[in-house]
Amino acid sequence: AEVDETLKRIQAHKGVIATMIINAEGIPIRTTLDNSTTVQYAGLLCQLTTKARSTVRDIDPQNDLTFLRIRSKKHEVMVAPDKEYLLVVIQNPCE
Amino acid sequence: AAMLADGSAPGAAVPSLWRSGRSLRCEAKSCQTGKISTAEAAVQSQTSQDASVQTDQSIDAAQAFQQEVQVDYASLLLFLQRVEDVVIKELNKNWTSRAFDGFEVNWTDQNEAVLCLHTLSYPEAQDQHLQVTSISWNATGSVLACSYGRLSDGDWSTEKSYVCTWNLDRRGLDPKHPDLVVDVPSSVLCLAFHPSQPSLIAGGLFSGEVVVWDTSRREDPLIWRTGLTDDTHTDPVYQVSWLPDAKHRNHFQLLSASTDGKVLVWREERDGRLALAEGFALVAQQIPRSAQLKKLTWGEAAVGVTSLSFSHFDPRVFIVGVEGGYSLKCSMAAETPALHRTGSSVSLRAPAELAFSPHGGPVYSVSCSPFHRQVLNLFLSCGTDGQVHLNSMLQTQPLLSLQLSKKYLFCVRWSPVRPLVFAAASGEGNQKCFCFTGDVHLFDFAKSSQKPAVSIKQAAAECPVYCLEFNIKQTQLLAAGDATGTVRVWQLSSDFTEQGPREMTHLEQLASETTD
């Protein structure tokens, strides 16, 4: 439905390798990668997002996490967090 | 005389009592023994506990994804609408950002130069002027084994040789004193450690036998051997390899290749014997000829296999290098029977599918790249003409031909971490009248595609380097064995051990440039 269309738009962007949506319990709902990799990403990123969020709020309780980007040698992982879901996009930057 | 007379005595008949005995009834009136008192003091059965399970590792626990997850599509849609713009903005920014250009982080200590970490040797073998014929790292990457023998012999030799192992992670490592020395009655020409069991090592002998040793057994490490039967090779075995078994993922079969043209697969049987499971034979008439190859005279002889390498992507495809100077692409799924003369218990098949453009002399080593995707499937081959050919399995002409030097090349290996790096070992052949120093060349296609990035001199003396192996677990280590009987372990500089960005794409580009 519209959900799939939105995901297709994101996936079609330049350099995007993979897209996935994970729910609050760490269960992947939509993904473009294989099962085992998705489950691995889901578990690890959920934990990291929680940790990042608590870091931000510990420093300033009025603040909150809006976006998380992890840049590595090979690509960049972008996490858009929310109360119920997590959107993860993996992009291979231009260089 | 009257006292002795013939007479007959009537026999005595005893009537049988068993029928009547059965009808008697007995009754216990009284016992003479007193009542014995018993009590439960100890039980012999023990409590049990599950310690380990023998089933194979399950693939993964992706069941969570398979479950029907209750998804509220309405709220999901709202969420996506909220974040979509943000994400697209970030994606665009990232694509055009120059912020990280040239920014590199060093997590580990940078090694600037190539260092020789260890120089290992076995003095007894060196006294007998034996050469290091093969080396192998074990599954954990901490034990290095080398085999002593002689590569330059033409005659049948019956001299003993040794297989020595050193555990490099142990304190108190004595470079002149191996942890384990196995005496072998014939020259060992090749070694291969088991890919998952760190103590099993297979060796191929000059006599054509294939044996397996267990290095954890001190008294008698030999656990399996093929023996000398009709099935075994009739020529020296130049390569042994462990093959994952198609049916049982954790079992491995042993494969051996020899100059008698046969590639045989062995399975373990009882009593320490290795029995032939399947086999392939290469005969000159069955080699597929490509229209692009020059017309070569093909004899009827068997085609001697000197090296073998499996493709990392299709486990049934392998490349062999032969004495005639060409490499062949073979498949284990081949069905046609081989025109091999000598009988054997299992019918041999002809595996060759494609013949690649030849070298100027026998091919001593082939190596399939562990990195390239199915489309490319690159492999390297080197031989006595001093050239290294970079070939794609899809075409007969090499993509790149590098003339390293006038020296023979004995071994070529891809780096397990950097898709663009390979190492080649060279030396002089014994027909030459002057000696060159043995060198190990490291090529880096990213720097230059014609000259070696680093040339490592193996020794001050003049001796060829016969074998080299990268350590898959500790990727900065490279071991090389030479003709004086020394094995050197080199620590490579960080240039060679860290994958730069986009190396894969660079190599694909290189490959496609040259095919056009």
Image (cartoon, rainbow, N blue to C red):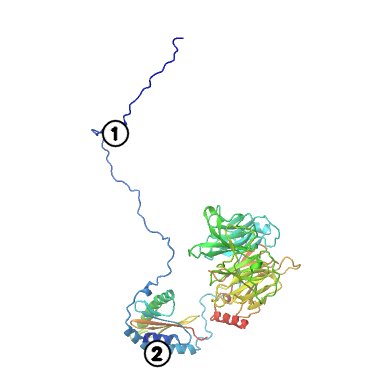
Tell me if label 2 and label 1 are in contact, CB under 8 Å.
no
* Image position, residue B149 (x, y; %): 65, 59
Quote the CA–CA distance across marks 2 and 1.
103 Å
Please report, as a chain letter, where disc 1 is located.
B
Question: On the picture, is B117 further left or further right than B35?
Answer: right
* Image position, residue B381 (x, y; %): 63, 72
Q: How many marks?
A: 2
Question: Visible in this render: residue B348?
Answer: yes
Dot 2 crowding, Cα within 10 Å, few <14, some 14–19, many 20+: few
Dot 1 crowding, Cα within 10 Å, few <14, some 14–19, many 20+: few
Q: Nearer the viewer, mark 2 or mark 1?
A: 1
Asked where in the image residue B134 lies, by quadrant, the reply is: bottom right
Image vertical order of residue B203 relative to residue B412, above or below: above
Q: Nearer the viewer, residue A39 or B18?
A: B18
Q: Nearer the viewer, residue B92 or B290?
A: B290
Residue extending furthest top?
A: B1
Q: For the point 28% across and 42% down, which residue is it?
A: B38
Asked where in the image residue B312 lies, by quadrant, the reply is: bottom right
* Image position, residue A81 (x, y; %): 37, 83
Image vertical order of residue B372 relative to residue B86, above or below: above
Tell me the residue that label 2 is attached to. Answer: B85
Q: Say what amino acid the circle numbered 1 marks.
A: Arg
Tell me the residue that label 1 is attached to. Answer: B22
Query: First in sequence: mark 2 or mark 1?
Result: 1
Label 2, secondary structure: give it: helix
Q: For the point 66% across and 64% down, which residue is it?
A: B302
The C terminus of chain B sits in image quarter: bottom right
